[in-house]
Image (cartoon, rainbow, N blue to C red):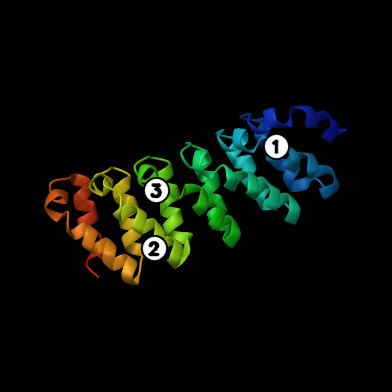
Amino acid sequence: MVVNSLRPCIVILMKNTNGNHVAQRCLQHLMPEYSQFLFDAAAAYCVELATDRHGCCVLQKCLNYAGGKQRRRLIQEITSNALVLSQDPFGNYVVQFIFELQIPQATIEILDQLEGNYADLSMQKYSSNVVEKCLEYGGEERRGHIIQELIGNPRLDQIMQDPYGNFVIQAALNWSKGAAKSALVEAVEAHVPLLRTSPYGKKVLSCSSLKK
């Protein structure tokens, strides 16, 4: 009776200030044979939920409680929309959550979606946090690709002086190693006079990893 009552309006409930708590309790307490309708709705309306203040929290709970096939379907929906979600005030948290699950294939799929856009993403409030996660969880090879993309961008000086971009560059300095780090340090040092005149550029220059 409960499932039949909730099913027609479950997406509305997931996005509602009070209703989202009902959806979360269903995830916690319903047996698998009764909770499937929640995962079906989450997958079918993934982007709508991910970009909602309350829906994004329910979606993350769905990922926690989902079984193998359910979870793979949800992750596929999220990763295939990673570029849009990364730039959203709430969707970015869902993408970050996927990184924190540390599922290699999911991480690769997000990186593939964002490739070619790292400069723009680095200078946006929400997506800059996702780029930092890319650097943290991307692994040495893909991290090197991101750094090369940033270094090769003609707006590198803007990124380093940006309120959000400077944190991305600091994260890149902190997580990079070997040749990638050397190339990044060299690129930063080439802009020292300019960075000294910028409040955010000074933050890059004060990064402890720049001096190591």
Q: Does residue 67 appear in the picture of this structure?
A: no
Q: Earlier in the sequence, mark 2 or mark 3?
A: 3
- At label 3, the amino acid type is Tyr
Circle 2: is it few (<14), some (14-19), or many (20+) Cα within 10 Å?
Answer: many
* Residue 143, x across and y down, in percent: 41, 61
Q: Is residue 44 left or right of residue 164?
A: right
Q: How many marks?
A: 3
Per the image, the residue denoted by label 2 is 144
Q: Earlier in the sequence, mark 1 or mark 2?
A: 1
Q: Earlier in the sequence, mark 3 or mark 1?
A: 1
* Residue 28, x across and y down, in percent: 73, 47
The quarter of the displayed image where residue 46 is located: top right
Per the image, the residue denoted by label 1 is 44
Q: Is residue 146 above or below residue 139?
A: above
Residue occupying image coordinates x 64% and y 30%? 18
Q: Quadrant of the N terminus?
A: top right
Q: Does residue 163 appear in the picture of this structure?
A: yes
The dot on residue 118 is 3
Q: Quadrant of the C terminus?
A: bottom left
How far, Cα to Cα, is label 3 from label 1?
28 Å
Q: Is residue 70 left or right of residue 203?
A: right
Q: Are marks 1 and 2 in contact (CB under 8 Å)?
A: no
* Residue 159, x across and y down, in percent: 28, 46
How far, Cα to Cα, is label 2 from label 3?
13 Å
Q: Is residue 26 left or right of residue 156?
A: right
Of residues 92 and 13, the one nearer the viewer is 92
